[in-house]
Amino acid sequence: MEPFPRQDGVLHAEGVSLEAIAAGVGTPVYVYSRGHMEHRYHALVAALEPRGADICYAVKANSNLRVLRCFAELGAGFDIVSGGELQRVVTAGGDPGRVIFSGVGKRTDELDLALKLGIRCFNVESAAELERLAGRARLHGCRARVSVRVNPDVDARTHPYISTGLKHSKFGVAVTEARELYRRASADDALDVVGIDCHIGSQITDPEPLLAALDGLLELVDELRGDGISLSHIDLGGGLGVRYHGGTDAEDFDVAGYGAALNQRLAGRPERLILEPGRYLVANAGVLLTRVEYLKPAVDTAGSHFAVVDAAMNDLIRPALYQAWHDVLPVRAAGAGAQQRRWSVVGPVCESGDFLAHDRELSLAADDLLVLCSAGAYGMVQSSNYNTRGRPAEVLVQGDRWQVIRRRETVRDQLAAELPDGHGAALGPGALER
Ligand code: LLP
């Protein structure tokens, strides 16, 4: 499914012109295709047949309430890493009984909330956390369902900031320590040992390290069974990579191959499989739509031509933080014979790290609309108010209908936490809106 087709030279989100969306809500704005999210979800479900798996969407990738509701309607559970994300899931209509709670630093109030709502499982990451969780469950007179996050010491071969499965990372516990934790947990009547989990990293393009991690987990599961501890699920985390460079969907992570390999390895085993994909389900369903404010030709042949756009590193930090690549496309295709140049696409933020793309062959004029592709995952969720810039609006498209699912943030929103009510009047009418 092509979520952003070009019709009569103009880029669309499904059946809606991106020019119409820019005219309606302004720029910068994140635009998501609901059809593509559904398509990805169904593709993953199909790849995991016949055994099947529980897909717990990783909320951190894109936590807009309407996006969460879409996955709840599709039948997904959720992987969360904070009390805030849990409250988003419940607000969106998600079932807390299908929520898995990951993360190395769960606070006491977050554990309490999750216990109260009866989540499916706590993915425990240390002996200290296990002890605190047992204490809270005892206090509340309930039992906490637990899984131990094992660090299988596998290299996910991805960017170091998003690689999490190596021995010295802060995540999970070593296989050797895990066995002891399981013994302790199974002897504690405030805990119910239900699973095992790992997550070795993100934007993984080859299934091989994920399968190596599974092999490590299976060995431990069998040892635990020998110790009299049987688990009901194996959670392999997320990490499935996507295509960021142009081309076709064929270059994406091979879910069919991954599914077949999982089916083969797990054949005849009683444990239920859980996956926690985020990026795979939403990255290519989203673009960041932005407008060119100014063009600044290079000062000399050694310099870059700059296209200064109205989106910046505060809206999409992935290029600055991970040197990530996002394709840049003009919304209106350049006419035949238009002069192309190599542009750096930069934002208004006051630092040279504020770039969205370097060295792109484009034919540009001031006021042109551009999109940064593959921005549906880890885009809006990592945005900030740096330079007192309001975070962008978000739009969800379905067929030929579109809807604002988060309005643009105003200066009033930003000042609200710093000022008592009623301030800002001195600025006069119309102030604080953008
Ligand atoms: N489960 C756990 C425990 C995780 O930590 C993550 C992501 C996921 C699942 C989902 O991983 P995914 O399927 O999306 O790869 N901000 C970075 C990505 C950080 C990923 C953190 N953990 C980026 O923009 O590339």
Image (spheres, grey):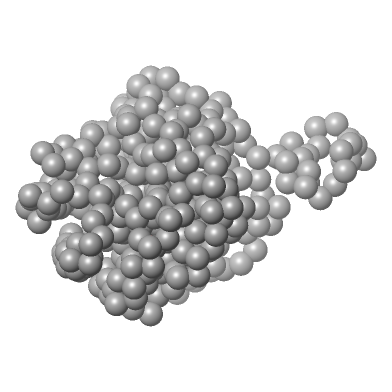
Judge from the rendering whether residue 186 lies leftward or rightward of residue 84; answer left or right.
left
Q: Residue furthest bottom?
A: 168
Picture mark count: 0
Q: Position of residue 411 (x, y in %)?
A: 74, 43
Q: Is residue 244 visible?
A: no
Residue most extreme to the right: 426
Residue at position x 60%, y 33% in the image = 407
* Snapshot quadrant of residue 230: bottom left
The answer, for residue 402, to whether it is visible in the render is yes
- Compare residues 401 and 43 and report the one nearer the observer: 43
For the residue pair 293 and 79, the one nearer the viewer reads as: 79
Judge by depth and name the residue closer to the eye, 231 or 166. Answer: 231
Q: Residue furthest top?
A: 400
Rendering coords of residue 144 (x, y %): 45, 51
Question: Quarter holding the N terminus?
Answer: top left
Q: Position of residue 253 (x, y in %)?
A: 21, 53
At horizontal 15% and vertical 48% (from top left) the residue drawn is 270
The C terminus: image quadrant: top right
Q: Position of residue 134 (x, y in %)?
A: 50, 59
**Occupied quadrant, residue 177:** bottom left
Q: Is residue 53 left or right of residue 56?
A: left
Residue at screen point 77% across, 47% down = 417
Q: Residue at x 52, y 52 (%)?
A: 137
